[in-house]
Image: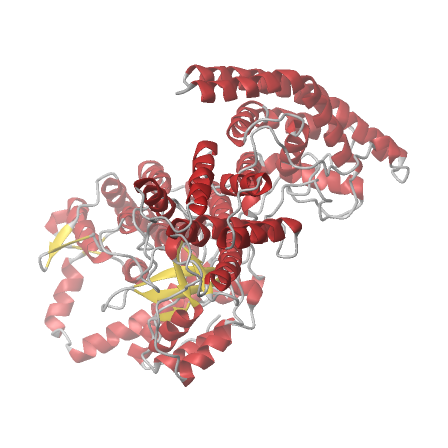
Amino acid sequence: MQLTDPASSRRPDTETALATIGSRRDFPPRVRTLLEGVLALAGSQLERSISLSLTECEQQLFKLAEKARSSNEQHGVFESLREVKRARADVAPRYLLHFESTLARLGEERKPANGEALPRFAELALVDTRDLEENITLQEIAAKAEIRHSQALYALGHRFGVLAGSPAIDAENLAVGPQRLCAGLRYATACIGVSLEHRLVMYRQFDRLLMAELGVLYSSINDYMVEKRILRNLQLTLPRARVAARGAGPVAPKRDPGAAADATIEKAAPEPSAAAQPPAETPLAHDAADDVRDSELFTTLRELLSGRRHIQQTAAPPSPATAAAATLSSYVATAEDLQSVLGALQCKPAASMVLGGRVVQRSIAHLKQDLLNQLRQFTPDGRPPQLGEEDADTLELVGMLFDFIAKDTRPDSASQSLLTKLQVPVLRVALRDKSFFTRRSHPARQLLNAIAETGQYWIDDGDGESDRTLVEKMQLVVDRVGAEFDGKVELFDEMLTDLSRHMGMLARKAEVAERRHVDAAKGRERLDLARERAVGAIGERLAGRKINRFVRTLLEQAWTDVLALTILRQGEESDAYRRRIDVADRLIGDGVATPDVREEIEQGLAQVGFHGDEAQAMVRQLFSAGEAAGADDSPASRTEMALKLKAKTRLGEDTTTTATTPATGETASHQGTRMAPIAPPLNAAERQMLERVRTLPFGTWFEFVQNQQGEAVRRKLSWFSTLTGRCLFVNQRGARTDERSMEQLARDLVRGQARIATIERESLIDRAWHAIVGTLKQITGHAPLAPA
């Protein structure tokens, strides 16, 4: 059940005073003139878009009225329609006043003033459900606009930074940025008293019409700034963010689970800022020293491969005659031959294979066999084809790279199929351009890393169905590479940018979804604590008392919820709480039906979800039962009312969610103040682990073992409460997965069923190369490679 304000009510007027450009006497004349120019330039376009949006909103409301399923619903829609028509003349002026105020606050404290930006939901109050929905809707609108116009906002951030005499201003704090424009939208429409549902309809029209025109607005403002000689030669080179979060490295050798958990917690706890990120992020730029070190990597890899071949030949040397005959009779394929054959293979679908009764994806070894078979058409006199030594090393290294990536990929998964399709294009790049091995910023290397990591953490996380939109986007990117790559690596760069943009949008959505779950968890905790106090107050009064069964049910069910809600809203020291406790005492005592008691009961029941007729019927039955003291307590009407009370959805229960939490075996909606069934006490190691868990920062990533094969899924500890012991875990997409107790988490860590995910500082591809080098050095007897 959700609690919302009445449709016609709005929040109290707490609007802060708006500033004007003219009131900023500290602005230099040139800055004031430029800001006034921006205001004049944007004013006409914003006013026109607002008018169109309100007109479209009226049309949408009229359509809703036509489709209304009842006269009451239709009446409510028409009331909203009349309200929009009444107040629409005030919306555009209010919006422009707010817009001018954001311009006038240029250079002030970077943290937005109260009411100047969208709230971040520090705490969830059940009475503010409408605020939460509005916040989320506006955040999503702003996030989409920021992604869509990131280049223009980048330029505007630098130019407004010049006006403010500060570094470049980020999009969130930019006066003309989507976040501030959405805050202005909320301010401007506060004068329209409509229901939450109809307000969201209005926001959607603003998103479709006003926000869609931001590109034209931003272009006009940038042109105006250039005309006024503000960073006329600014180069729009956006830094590209890493597409996907880093994952955990290879599983460490087996050791004592408790010791392993101790070590991982000691490693994670001192770095809250790192743990708070989805597992880790690679820096946007590498030191020049990194590329210098990497330039030696390909040579090192070839030397190690040569050493391995020498060991293999020593173990099983071919006869001299056989080796000489093979050398004399074979034909070494040229680079042109290889590219021609691989280009043909690139156009063909990568066929699956059956090995040991299982369907597997094509490997590089299989691709090599296909390559040699196709090369026969280029060999003179039927001589067998052979790869040059460097080409053979390249193919083997690419094969080892894909084999390493496949270890962390689920067989027959969507990401495994995508990686298989990239085999030929990546091999063609590596054969032609050895900087693929030595340059971390190589476009093909970065795209391969992005596909692998995105598949691992966003698609193959073992949490139900994959995000079809993301799978389709990745499929489109990979298919374009396969269809269009002809040797120009710029295509990889273009596809990486396209995927990065899409991942940025998903990351924003995940952040909003996670924040919503955290706020809901905080709200449930506050409700649980309030209900616990209400249950205690009612239980104390009912102890040892024999009263009417219907009255007892009412007090233990509905009236307990009324008291809990009152504690949430006004607190236990409020007059409202004292009045409602007094009602409980009256019902337990004399049960006199005074008008003020009847009114208090009806109002309280209405606040916890009882309709007016229901509440009145309850009151009538309640006092008829009280007046019939000593009579039989089993009339059908009272029994029916008691059953209705017990079946009624309790305050804060989510009727749409019945998922059982792994830790407790209870449904989330009925856990109440109980976090878990009675469990054996923690042992010494588990108690010590519990204390360490309490020190972990929000945002720490865990790996939970799913089966006896050791397969694990990654989950983010988004929030926990030291009061109730409840922990909230989400996946990469921000969706809630588990709600377990801190005690259960401590047990799992000690038993090895959970572990803190390693915070990786390198990309998946970088880790792969170091692992490959380490393996080759072990084979050839060299010392392991030190991490770069």
Q: Residue furthest left?
A: 357
Question: Dividing the picture into quarters, in which one does residue 93 lie?
Answer: top right
Near-viewer residue (74 or 578): 578
Q: Who is closer to the viewer here, 571 or 780? A: 571
* Left or right for 45, reference 778: right
Q: Examine the rendered structure and indicate whether residue 32 appears above or below residue 578.
A: above
Relative placement, left or right, of 247 versus 570 is left
The foreground one among 581 and 478 is: 581
From what the image shows, is residue 45 above or below residue 561?
above
Q: Position of residue 569 (x, y in %)?
A: 60, 49
Inspect this view and state whether residue 505 appears: yes
Q: Is residue 386 above or below residue 752?
A: above
Colour scheme: secondary structure
Give the quarter of the figure containing the N terminus: top left
Percent of width and height locating residue 567: 58, 53
Q: Nearer the viewer, residue 223 or 687?
A: 687
Image point (81%, 30%), residue name:
34
> In the visual, does 290 lie left or right of 469?
right
Q: Which residue, as the protein is rendered here, is positioned at the far front? A: 630
Question: Residue 438 sits in which quadrant?
Answer: bottom left
Q: Is residue 720 visible?
A: no
Q: How many marks on residues? A: 0
Report the residue at 50% width, 77% height from top.
691
* Location of residue 749 in the rendering, given as x and y in whole percent from the top left corner: 38, 74
The x, y position of residue 698, in whole percent, is 52, 62
**Which residue is drawn at the image coordinates 64% and 30% (left, top)?**
185
In the depicted structure, whether residue 636 falls above or below residue 717:
above
Looking at the rendering, which quadrant does residue 22 occupy?
A: top right
